[in-house]
Amino acid sequence: MNTKYTLIIFGSFLILSILFLYLMITDNWNYFVFQLKWIMRIVTPLLIIYLFYSEKNRNKKKL
């Protein structure tokens, strides 16, 4: 596995663990769910566009 991806996975796991621990201590779940929905609304289309673009480039290299 590529080192870059490993660092991204462990970094995101660490950040999410700290965030969930903070939310359990402060009991602020409603705000977190609201923010998570907005983040997912922004990130999902960008991720889909990136995946289409990378697949298009991958198909060009095979031809």
Image (spheres, rainbow, N blue to C red):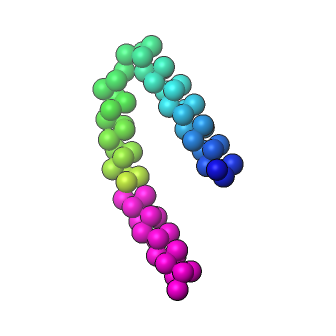
Q: Is residue 32 above or below residue 41?
A: above
Q: Is residue 49 above or below residue 28?
A: below
8 and 21: which one is in front? Answer: 8
53 and 36: which one is in front? Answer: 53
Rendered residue at 54%/81% (across/down): 62
Start-end of magenta stretch: 45-63
31 and 40: which one is in front? Answer: 40
Residue sticking out furthest to the bottom: 63
Rendered residue at 33%/50% (across/down): 41
Rendered residue at 64%/50% (across/down): 1
Q: Is residue 41 above or below residue 56?
A: above
Q: Is residue 28 above or below residue 44?
A: above
Rendered residue at 32%/32% (across/down): 33
Q: How many marks?
A: 0
Magenta region, mostly helix, strand or loop?
helix
List x then y, in percent, for residue 15. 55, 32
* Position of residue 49 in the picture relative to residue 60 (left or right): left
List x then y, in percent, for residue 46. 42, 59
List x then y, in percent, for residue 40. 36, 46
Q: Is residue 50 magenta?
A: yes
* Position of residue 43 in the picture relative to residue 61 (left or right): left
